[in-house]
Image (tube, grey):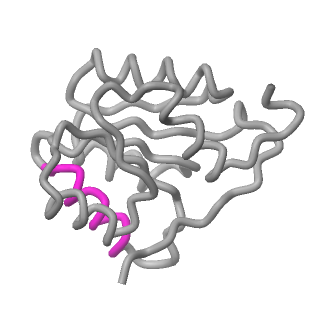
Amino acid sequence: MPITPVSVPCINRAALKILIVDDSSVSRTNIRSVLKSLGFTNFVEVSDGAQAIAMAASQTFHLIVTDYNLTQMDGLGLVNHFRQAPGPISVPILMVTAETEPIVLDAARNLGVAEIFGKDFAVDRVRPAIDKLFEPSATDT
């Protein structure tokens, strides 16, 4: 049974902390740029799943955006780790991937990935998912 991420009412997106996990600095820059255009300003960036786990153990994040293909631990393994961790994990996770195989995408969805995007991670495609997860307010415009 798929896990459904919890929607978080948000007064100020700039106050939320985002973990970006991608082994490509160009992709991390694009993800950060898109999220900035949607009102987020507080980012932590890492290049692999092991670093993401270490960061999540020491900090609280309100959103995780991860690539599927990572070194040391792929995005699916990372999502699985977060969903298997003790205690309720309701942090929304977005996945960015060039993968198109339904079995790969379905596995991510079944672990509770809120939305899966292509590597272009374009603002017009990302905005509806972000608005659904983090209700926009008057201060987000």
Going by the image, does 43 lie left or right of 118? right
Residue at the spot 66% in from the left edge and 44% down from the top edge? 131
Which residue is at the front of the view, 18 or 123? Answer: 123
Q: Is residue 68 above or below residue 9?
A: above
Query: In the rendered view, would you say 98 is above or below 123?
Result: below
- Residue ID at (31%, 71%): 110
- How far across and down, in percent of the image, does residue 47 sit? 25, 32
Q: Position of 43 compared to 97: left or right?
A: right
Left-right relation of 83 to 127 = left
Indicate whether residue 74 is drawn in magenta: yes
Q: Left or right: 96 with respect to 34? A: left
Which percent across, then down, holds residue 25?
27, 18
Tell me the quadrant of the picture where the C terminus can be found: top right
Residue with the most extreme right position = 138
Does 131 sit above or below residue 81?
above
Residue 75 is situated, as x and y percent measured from the top left of the image, at 23, 50
Residue 65 included in the magenta stretch of the image: no
Compared with residue 81, is residue 29 higher up or lower down, i.e. above or below?
above
Residue 137 placement: quadrant:
top right
> Residue 85, located in which quarter of the rendered image?
bottom left
Residue at 86 percent across and 31 percent down: it is 139
Instruction: Say which of 20 and 104 sits in front.
Output: 104
Does the magenta stretch mainly form a helix, a strand or a loop?
A: helix
User: Residue 70, percent across and down?
Assistant: 16, 40
> How many numbered discs sit on the rendered protein?
0
> Which residues fall within the magenta stretch?
73-84
